[in-house]
Amino acid sequence: MSNNQYSLKVYISDGSLALLKEYGYRLCIAKEVNGKFNVVFQGVNKLLFQNTFRFEDRYRVFGTNTFSDGALIEASTKKNPILGGLETTLSSAGVFSTASGAVDPAAGFTVHNQYTDPIHFGVDALVGSGYSSIYVAEKPVLSGDVFLAPKKKLMVWFEQDLEADMMISRAITNAIRLDFTSTSDITINYTAPANAPAKGVWSYGPLVVLGQTYHPETNTFSLTQTILPTAEELVQLTKLLQLEPPSESGGHLAITNGDARGKKIGRRFRGRLRVYRFICGIG
C-alpha cells in the first residue's frame, strides 16, 4: 500500500448491528480539512459484522454557492482533480485551470481565486472506487489565494439523519477520532447497550467473538457457558499443570510444589487460571 493509501476496518457486535439497523442508524465518517470535520464523507447503512473502507489521498476541488448545516452539497463549478502540493486557478469566469506543480502527498494544495463573487470552496476525496465530499468552507471568500489542507485524520460515529455529502456544523458526540499519519491500517470495533445503540463503546482492534459477551455498563467481558471447561476437563487441566483440583465442596485451585517443570508451567498459566477460577466461582 502506497503512502497516500490507507484502510479502515470497523467491526460491529451482533446485538448492536441488529439494533442500529432497526432504528435507522448510519455509520458516518468525516475527514479533517483545515482543522474541521464538517462534511459526512461516508454515511453507510448497509452494514455487516466487518466493514472495510479504503481511502486514497486523491482529491477534487470545486466551488459552491452555499454552506448550510444538514443540506447536501451542490457543486456550482466543475470538480477539478488535484493532489497534495499542486495549485490551480479559478478564473474570473469561474473555470478551473489544470492543476500543476510538484506533488507532495503530505501537503495541502492552493487555489488562486480570481473569481470576484463570494464562493465557498469544497473538496472531494477518493474512497473505494469513487469520490465523495469531505469539506466545504463555511464562509465564502472573494478573490485571493485559498489553501486547503486535508489530513489523514478521520472521525467515525453513528447517527440517524445524516448521509454522505451532507454538511454539518454542530458538535458530534460519541465519536472516535483516528490518525493515519503514521500508519496505513487501523481496526476498530463497536459495542452498544441494548437500550442505546448509538451510545456504545469504541475500541481499537477486532471484536473478540469466540464465546465472549461484552457488557458496556461494566466495561467487562464474560465467557459463554458453552466454552467453559467441564468439571472433568478441569481435573484433566490440573493434572497437566501440576495443580490440586478443587474439592466437590468448592475449593481453590492451587499450584503445588511439583518438580521444576511443574513450577515453570504453573508460573506461565497462573494468570489464565485466575480467569477460570473467577468464571467458575471457585476462587
Image (spheres, rainbow, N blue to C red):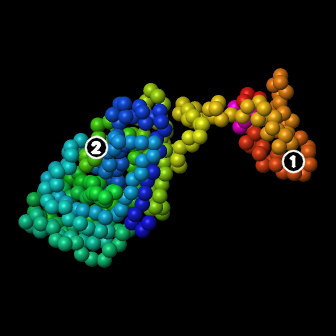
Q: Label 1 is placed on what type of residue? A: Gly
- SS of the residue at dot 2? loop
| Residue 127 spot, x, y in % from top left | 33, 57
Q: Residue under circle 1?
A: 262
Give neighbour class at mark 1: few <14, some 14-19, many 20+ (Cα, 10 Å): some
Q: Is residue 281 above or below residue 91?
A: above
| Count of numbered circles on the image | 2
State the residue lying farthest toward the top.
249
Q: Is residue 58 above or below residue 223?
A: below
Q: Is residue 208 left or right of residue 16?
A: right
Q: What distance separates the C-alpha of mark 2 from that of mark 1?
A: 59 Å
Residue at position x 43%, y 36% from top? 17
Q: Is 184 within the magenta?
A: no
For the residue pair 90 and 252, the one nearer the viewer reads as 252
Q: Is residue 243 above or below residue 196?
A: below
Q: Is residue 147 left or right of residue 185?
A: left
Q: Label 2 is placed on what type of residue? A: Glu
| Location of the C terminus (image quadrant) | top right
Mark closest to the chain's N terminus, 2 or 1: 2
| Residue 186 spot, x, y in % from top left | 48, 54
